[in-house]
Each structure stands twice: as structure tokens, then as C-alpha cells.
């Protein structure tokens, strides 16, 4: 049983090994002092997305810098399931909320795309990465999802690995529901959720998607969901099948 609170965790891009010392950046020092409220000689959980999770002890800490002594490994790294989300970025805090929640749900890869009805043309990678790191620290996962370069919908799918089957959450779909899909398809090949923009994909884009044999259109129910809500619901259903 760990003696570290689950929320007292820090992601750091540094090699982790027993008895090594880590000099903290200004931002990580601020996070430990003002968010986690950890002080000298207290313990903290450290992970880098590669080498599992380690127990650290705060050796020194002030407003400008801190040093952590890596004590011992407390959890080995395990390979994550491949779970992708392809989505059209949405405005403001709801985009951050979406990234936070899909990270908590175990998404390994995030693919932002541009569609004909896109509202956001530029993707704020710095904010998205910070959001995914924060969600990983809070949720207890040992990895940070990879956020890919934003691409046009058709360009991304032309380069897509066809073995990774995609669930297209289509509010106009009447006959195909999530539970029905898994009765007839090989579960292991369905690992990707596609979420359209607010207002949906254009008719031309929908016809394009329906002609791709590695994409399955499904309904998430009778209600028309916001993009962030649809992403959470679809990924919850998918991860329930996977884990």
C-alpha cells in the first residue's frame, strides 16, 4: 500500500533512477509549492511516461528552485492500450475540458483535425499539452497522450492505418448503435473515436466517411450531444469494452 496521496504526483521529462537528484524547473517548483502544497522532507510521486512511477523526497525547496531525491520505484511501466480520438477542436475552456477528460479516460493519441465546419483553425499545442499533463498527474495514469499535428480530415484519413478501425459518432445515424457494432466486428480492431464539429460534418464529408470501409457510423442515442459530451460518452463505451 502506498503512503503517497494519489494527487501528490509530478510528471517530469527526466530519467528516473534510484538515489539520483532532480533539479526542478521554476514551473515545477511553483506547482509543488502552491498546488500540491508539499514542503521539504515530504514525499512525492514522480513519473516520466517511460520508466514507471517513483517515490521522491523533497531535499530542498524555495520559491525559485527545488531538488528531489529519487528514492525507489513504486510501480513499473506498463504499455497502454492504443486508443485514439480524432476530433475537430472547439472554442475556449471546453476544448481544455475535452482534452482533460479524454486523458483521464486513457486515450493514447489525440488527433486534432480541420473540417469544412471548423470554428478553430489554429490549435494551441502548449495549452493542450499542459492540460493533458495535469490530467495525467491527477488521474494516476503513467503516460501522457501524444497530441499529433493538426491535419485536414481527408488528409489524415488518407494516411490512416486501416487496421485501426474508427467509430464515427454520427447524430444522423438511425440504425446502428454502439452495442450492436461490437456484436459483429472484431473488438480488438476498433480503437478510435471520430467526433465532428459543432453543427456536424458537411454532407460531402459524411459521404466521404461512409465510403471508407474502416469507419463505422454509430448513434450515441436520441439526443444531439455537444462535441465534448459525445467524446466522453463514446470513449467511456469504448474503454469499457477494452479493459
Image: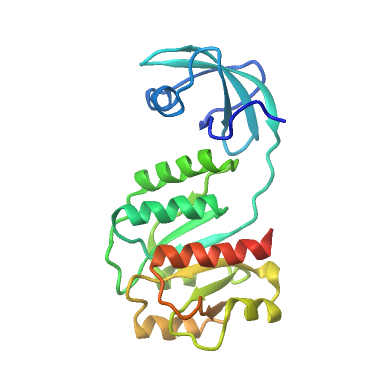
Up-down: is 150 above or below 54?
A: below
Percent of width and height locating residue 65: 41, 16
Q: Nearer the viewer, residue 242 or 120?
A: 242
- Quadrant in the rendering for residue 71: top right
Q: Quadrant of the N terminus?
A: top right
Report the label total: 0
Q: Quadrant of the C terminus?
A: bottom right
Q: Is residue 232 left or right of residue 140?
A: left
Percent of width and height locating residue 41: 55, 12
Residue at image x 36%, y 48%?
A: 125
Q: Nearer the viewer, residue 151 or 69?
A: 69
Q: Is residue 179 left or right of residue 173?
A: right
Residue at image x 41%, y 28%?
A: 31
Up-down: is 90 above or below 225?
A: above
- Quadrant in the rendering for residue 61: top left
Q: Nearer the viewer, residue 117 or 105?
A: 105
Instruction: Identify the colour scheme used.
Output: rainbow
For the question of whether residue 160 can be seen, the reply is no
Up-down: is 48 above or below 170?
A: above
For the question of whether residue 39 can be seen, the reply is yes
Q: Residue furthest bottom?
A: 175
Residue at image x 55%, y 72%?
A: 166
Percent of width and height locating residue 72: 68, 22
Residue at image x 40%, y 53%?
A: 97
Amino acid at each position: 500500500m502506498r503512503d503517497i496521496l494519489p494527487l501528490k504526483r509530478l510528471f517530469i521529462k527526466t530519467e528516473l533512477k534510484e538515489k539520483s537528484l532532480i533539479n526542478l524547473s521554476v514551473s515545477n517548483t511553483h506547482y509543488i509549492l502552491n498546488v500540491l502544497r508539499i514542503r521539504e522532507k515530504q514525499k512525492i510521486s514522480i513519473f516520466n511516461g517511460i520508466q514507471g512511477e517513483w517515490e521522491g523526497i523533497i531535499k530542498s525547496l524555495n520559491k525559485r528552485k527545488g531538488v528531489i531525491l529519487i528514492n525507489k520505484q513504486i510501480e513499473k511501466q506498463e504499455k497502454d492500450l492504443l486508443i485514439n480520438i480524432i476530433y475537430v477542436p472547439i472554442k475556449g475552456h471546453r476544448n481544455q475540458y475535452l482534452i482533460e477528460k479524454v486523458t483521464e479516460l486513457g486515450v493514447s493519441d489525440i488527433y486534432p483535425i480541420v473540417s469544412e465546419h471548423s470554428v478553430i483553425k489554429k490549435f494551441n499545442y502548449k495549452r493542450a499539452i499542459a492540460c493533458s499533463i495535469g490530467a495525467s498527474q491527477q488521474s494516476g495514469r503513467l503516460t501522457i497522450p501524444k497530441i499529433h499535428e493538426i491535419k485536414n480530415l481527408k488528409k489524415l484519413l488518407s494516411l490512416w492505418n486501416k487496421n485501426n478501425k474508427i467509430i464515427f459518432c454520427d447524430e444522423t445515424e438511425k440504425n446502428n448503435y454502439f452495442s450492436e457494432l461490437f456484436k459483429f466486428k472484431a473488438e480488438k480492431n476498433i480503437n478510435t473515436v471520430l467526433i465532428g464539429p459543432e453543427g456536424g460534418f458537411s454532407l460531402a464529408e459524411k459521404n466521404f466517411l461512409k465510403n471508407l470501409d474502416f469507419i463505422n457510423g454509430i448513434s450515441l442515442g436520441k439526443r444531439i450531444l455537444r462535441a465534448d459530451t459525445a467524446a466522453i460518452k463514446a470513449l467511456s463505451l469504448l474503454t469499457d469494452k477494452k479493459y
